[in-house]
Amino acid sequence: MPQPDSPTTFWQLSRDGELRFHFHPGQKRALESRKRFILACAGWQSGKSVIGPPWLYREIRLRGPGDYLVAAPSFTLMPKKILPEFTRLFERQLRLGSYSRGDGLFTFSEQGCLSMFGFVPDDPVHVFFGHAQDPDSLESATYKAAWIDEGGQKAFRLASWEAILGRLSLVEGRVLITTRPYDWGWLKQTLYDPWENARRNHPLIDVITFRSIDNPAFPKAEYERARLSMPDWRFRMKYMGEFTRTAGMIFDCFDERVHKVPRFAIPSTWPRWLGLDFGGVHTAGVFLAQEVNDRGVGTGRLFAYRIYGPAGNATAAQHVQELIRPEPCLPQAVGGSKSEDQWRYEFGAAGLPVRAPDLADVEVGIDRVYGAIKRNELFVFDDLAGLLDELQSYSRVVDDMGEPTREIDEKSRYHLLDALRYVLSYLKPGTGDWGPITEPPPDPRMEISKAPPGVFLEEYSLR
């Protein structure tokens, strides 16, 4: 039988076995939403994670026996919040089954099935626990519903989201994502933006935001202290659950209203370019079309129309085959670092010549990409979610005072941007450069020291 527990901030189990909720209005809106994809985007300690177990409990009751998923960005985050919240309700209070740490699996007991469904199904009922750092843990079953906690973190990548969608697609399972906003990556691109563009009335997506202070237990004085002491952008993201441009955002000039464009048929007369980033497990490519006007003159505008990878476990010949197979002609390719001549040789031997980049400095390459965007010379098709995700999440590490440093946050994971940087550095060699260095004109005041004694009417001493 379910066991009563001491009251919590948000919910409790009464002595008669009734589960009673004490949610604030923001939590209620998230739980009451009937959309397929629910994004509860909220501030620190606002009570966003605690709605996950009750939401999943209701989904299991409605959808019946089967497999379900709970996911976190990393293995280390799992036992800190998401697992204790889940087991406290499902295991300790409702006694529906048990969690196996070795398998990362919660299994309903026979008594738990009788309590939940009124019968014992032939196949076991499981809740799988997975994390984005282990994609295999997200592809273990066909899920009927999924709860994702802190899906906005960089560790939770677009590929992990797509893997979960694939496992939910057969039954069109619902998803609850509880998170703070961290950057303008895939979460904003694929969920928040479509909801906003639909005037906040999307047929499939619901976004619910609430502040830290909406939690009745959150101290008002602490909220005000943070508001008065933190940069506005940081406070709004961390305590209000709002997407804002961070101080460390590198391509802050990328304007979705301008640089993200609907897909169109690219004329066959436009030259095709390919930027490549080599790697054993992360070879990536970005394809660009160079716009030509009706008079056959290049306009200087480039359109990113296709991405490849990041992909691994393939030979150079296999990569080349996949890269050029859909293309109407062989693209001109630029890629790899200065030292990766062997990769370029193997790709060339397989039928795709690759030029070496004309510079090795990463910061200069970033400046050239930034300049192309700033001058409205680079546009991205709106269905290239992977590239858009990287463009909008590429950022510098921010120090304790909220100021950006020179260090790029998780630089090693931005393979598509590395590929874009290689090809744009070649195509836009002047963009972002400081120009020729010239000697400044002589300061006429310096001539005073060269004048003979007596030229000036008065002598001055520094003593």
Image (spheres, helix red, strand yellow):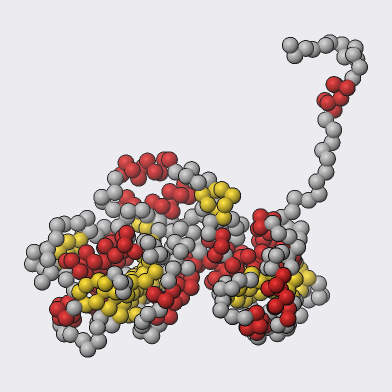
**How far across and down, in percent of the image, does residue 259 sit?**
62, 65
Above or below, 272 relative to 221:
below
Q: Name above or below for residue 246 compared with residue 166.
A: above
Residue 255 image offset from top left, x and y in percent: 59, 61
- Residue 177 placement, left or right of 336: left
> Residue at coordinates 82% horizontally, 75% vertically from top-left?
295
Asked whether the viewer can see residue 128, the reply is: yes
Residue 31 visible at all = no
In the rendered image, which quarter contains the C terminus? top right
Q: In which quarter of the image is residue 257?
A: bottom right
Q: Which residue is drawn at 25% across and 50% down?
A: 217
Left or right of residue 335, residue 126 in this image: left
Number of residue marks: 0
**In front of the other: 412 or 192:** 412
Question: Which residue ends up furthest to the bottom in the rendered image?
Answer: 122
Q: Quadrant of residue 364?
A: bottom right
Residue 96, quarter of the rendered image: bottom left
Residue at image point 74% right, 54% down: 433
Where does residue 167 sit, x and y in percent of width and height?
40, 80
Residue 270 coordinates in the image, percent (x, y): 74, 77
Could you tell whether 59 is left or right of 411 in the image? left
Instruction: Give the residue at the far left of this rendering.
Output: 16
Name the residue at 38% across, 65% down: 75
Rendered position, 29 above or below 237: below
| Quarter in which the N terminus is drawn | bottom left
